[in-house]
Amino acid sequence: MVSVVIGISTIILFSVFSEAQLEQKTFVSHSGQIINTSGDVLDPLYTASTVEFDPEMYLRDFNYGIISESTNGKIIREFTIIADDDKIQEISPGVFYNVWTFNGTVPGPTIRATEGDLVRINFINNGSKSHTMHFHGIHQAEMDGVFEIVGPGGGRFTYEFEAGPVGVHPYHCHVMPLEEHIVRGLYGVFIVDPKESRPPADEMVMVLNGFDTDFDTENNFYAANTIPFYYQHHPIQINTGELIRIYVVNMVEFDPINNFHLHGNLYQYYPTGTDLVPSFYTDMITLSQTERGIMEFQYTFPGKYLFHAHKVEFSEKGWVGLFLVKDNSTSSEVQYGN
Amino acid sequence: METNEKTSKIRMIASGVIPFVFVILMMAYIFGPGADLLDFGVSLPELTIEKINFEKSEIHVTVRNTGPIPVSIVMADVNDRIQPAAIEPDKFLERYETALVRIPFEWNTAEPYAIGLTTDDGTRFERIAEAAALALKPNLEFMTFFAIIGTYVGIIPVMIGLLWLPFIKKISKNKYHFFLALTAGLLLFLGLDSIEEALDVSFENLNGSFNAVLLIATTIVLSFLGLYYASEKLTGKADSLKISKPVAIGLMIAIGIGLHNFGEGLAIGAAVGLGSIAFSTFLIVGFALHNTTEGLAIAAPMSRGKLMIGKLILLGIIAGSPVIFGAWIGGFFFSPLYSVIFLSIGAGAIFQVIVIILKWIREEGDKTLSSAAVVSGFALGVLIMYLTSILI
């Protein structure tokens, strides 16, 4: 009897033990220690993980619209933007949040046109609440997306205006309560290129945003392009000696400021991108709500370089990333994003 | 005749069982498949961080799912800054299931830390450790440390209280009633004190789960009834057990106080173990003064028997030493749930002792318990305890 009990318990103990052995997982602590665990790893920081939205795709994804020409020779760029507010999206590994979206993503698609083009946006509101699209820029009052509320369940509106001024601008929903309609994710980037285009570069868009997942009017997560820590475990690959141009837009709510610090380098900064001559040569800019601009820089030395909010609280909650600079002397031809 | 009896018996059993059958059928209907009509309203996740231990280069967080639905824990933070972490055995917690979250972190001694855990719906739950201190390991050093604290707080004060015995022995019956009532008053305060402590622990740690207030009430009633029954048996058989009635009553009082002191020890050990207080000498003095009165409670009934020093010391140890065991358990294996239960058992035990003492006074002559001696003694007892409690 006793031996049977011992035998059975040995089998049970052994199987538990061997199972634990098999399922050992590891992760790296801040100080570089390797930690073993028999349980689950909770690490959005360093452990490579992906969620539904892909910041890598978004980074260099520019939408020029369906192009046609008007009778007077003007370029018309036509876009279809659909608003929704019922999507539950994984906004950090394991964290699910009800985002409101333009074309299914936060941020919405990057809309790009050349100064003077006619931009036509067929806006459809498939949400359960009223929504609009309000573009920063110069346009007629009735195209401002504030008083022309577009009703839920398929409401439509066509926004039409001439692209301008040159620069990088946000667009966002402008229905009250406004803060909610913005922080839920109804925003995106609108780039107006000068008629004589800027020098070729590896171009990217970074929307600095945050999420208040527990509704206490404080952000729980911050990021460049929605997913916290994403570019830390998926470094952005660039080349030495290559011009990098970042269109950066700050959409963080609740916190009065945000900022952008680059390691091992300084950048030329064009506030709002409206001027073709840079205003600053710096490694640190401070941005208030919807403040934005264009950064240009190139790396001389290969390696890993951080970029992050120097309001370090934000970087410790996700607004941090890495450039992986590869030596360009061996690669033959520079490939640009556009 | 026999079959008749049999059928009536079966009928009786059936009539007792039938309601249960319907209860089970109702449950099956409510929880069974296709019974979605009862699923309305929104269930929110609820986590309770029960314990934060500071280990070398790691913070260990014990968390329990105290909400109505299963949750998964997806992120840990220290002072509201996201940290890589591990959760064992896994991140999915069924109702009432616990898990250990290990956060590698170079913490600093004596500094406060807010530990946060975030569930899959983005809700963050937080608990603050007021002063980080390396978690106690059940080694000889700390065993000794707690034993010494327990001796100072539990055994010595009770022994000092027992020294009132010769004094009580010499006084008149009326004054004796006064002291018995005083003891009852002291104990009433201790009982209330235990309840307050139990409520505090449950509100801070259990987040209203386990129906904490009703858990405390239920445990007190059961503890009271169990000890009351035992004490009636003991005093009833006092003669056959070759102990005098005063000794039997003294013993029940000592056991009651001992159970209470066990709860007190748990609280002391937990406080040291969790780093929520620095165990100051001032605090020890406060507890010691407070507990001196407990010795008096044992001395009062014992004064009517023969002076038996050996038995008296034994009763003192029964009453005082549980502080040590409580401190060990509280310091090394703190669990808020068990703390609440033991504090409630202690309270029930104390109330039982009060009833014994009041019965003893009635047997001694004061049938209505309304003489000036009894009433003033009772009142003074409560008042003394309140005043000494301010010191803690």
Image (cartoon, rainbow, N blue to C red):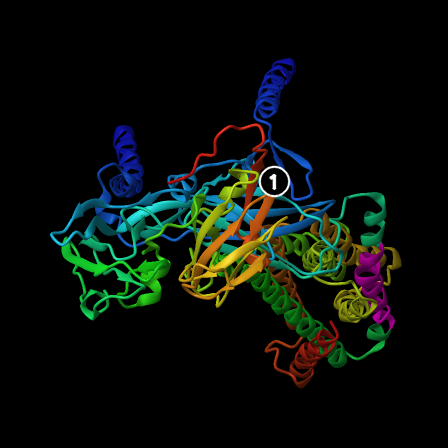
Image side of residue A215 versus residue B147, left or right: left
- Residue for point 67% across, 34% down: A34
Q: Residue at x 16, y 60 (%)?
A: A151
Indicate the secondary structure of the residue bearing disc 1.
Answer: strand
* Amino acid type, label 1: Lys
**In the image shown, does B348 or B339 lie closer to the viewer?**
B339
Q: Position of residue A125 (x, y in %)?
A: 19, 54
B159 lies above or below B107: below
Q: Residue at x 30, y 68 (%)?
A: A177
- Please give left or right for residue B353 compared with residue A322 in the image: right
**Which image quarter is the C terminus of chain A in?**
top left
Q: Which residues are magenta?
A: B148-166
Is residue B197 shown to the viewer in this render? yes
Chain letter for the residue marked with disc 1 in the picture? A
Which quarter of the picture shows residue B25? top left
Q: Quadrant of residue A168?
A: bottom left
Q: Is residue B224 visible?
A: no
Residue B125 percent coordinates (x, y): 51, 55
Residue A326 x, y percent position in the rendering: 57, 34
- The residue where tag 1 is placed is A304
- Is residue A165 inside the magenta stretch? no
Q: Is residue B141 left or right of residue A42?
A: right
Question: Looking at the image, which residue is at 85% across and 47% down?
Answer: B141
- Residue lying furthest bottom: B372
Residue B164 sits inside the magenta stretch: yes
**Where, by quadrant of the figure, is residue B301 drawn?**
bottom right
Q: Position of residue B208 (x, y in %)?
A: 48, 58
Q: Would you say the magenta stretch is mainly helix, strand or loop?
A: helix
Front residue of this view, candidates B192 and B176: B192
In the picture, which quadrant includes the N terminus of chain A?
top right
